[in-house]
Amino acid sequence: MRDSAVSAEADRLSDAADSILRARASTSAQSISGRETEAMMRLQAAIDAVFPDDEQVDASVDAALNARHLLRVLPDDFPLPEIGVDPDGAIALDWMPSRTRMLSVSIAGSDRLAYAWMNGSDRGHGVVRFAGSTLPAPLLLQLRSTVAHEHSAIRAA
């Protein structure tokens, strides 16, 4: 047990994430990229920062695994998201290229991903199923739309 303020579920979640990283590091057939390492470290830091109370629930092991799978299938040319844990225990992945453009994905323990986006005065939300191996097309299209402006602004400067 790490700390008396940390729940048993948080300890199990942290141990599961640690074992995933150790297993990946020790597998010689698969090398982990620096980008993937950074994504997993951000995920672990977000999980470790949670202190459950009446208003905050720990992220479940299933939510952490789903987030890990989603982070691994993101296109390599997209920036990594900010990662946090919502009060209900869902893991949030947020891309905020500007104050008028954002995409937020909420990952729980099921195969459903909830997302919301804003692009100028356009906004919307949706739910897609995620099998763990490919990013669902509607979510990928929205992510490309949100992040594409960031890349074109960099090229134009």
Image (cartoon, rainbow, N blue to C red):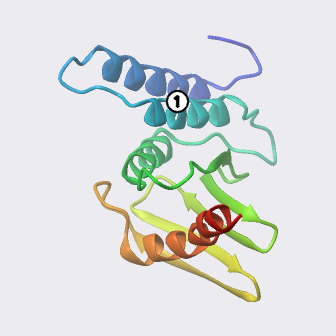
Q: Is residue 29 above or below residue 140?
A: above
Q: Is residue 156 above or below residue 5?
A: below
- Where is residue 151 shown, x and y percent of the image? 59, 63
> Residue 122 appears in which quarter of the rendering?
bottom right
Which residue is outermost to the left? Answer: 29
Picture residue at 39% right of the left edge, 46% below the top: 72
**Image position of 64 (left or right of 149):** left
> Looking at numbered disc 1 in the image, what kind of residue is underneath it?
Leu
- Where is residue 36 shown, x and y percent of the image? 44, 36
**Image position of 77 (left or right of 154):** left
> Helix, strand, or loop for circle 1?
helix
Q: Name the foreground residue: 54 vs 140.
A: 140
Q: Which residue is tagged 1? A: 13
Picture residue at 54% right of the left edge, 25% below the top: 14
User: What is the quadrant of the N terminus in the image?
Assistant: top right
> Residue 99 appears in which quarter of the rendering?
bottom right
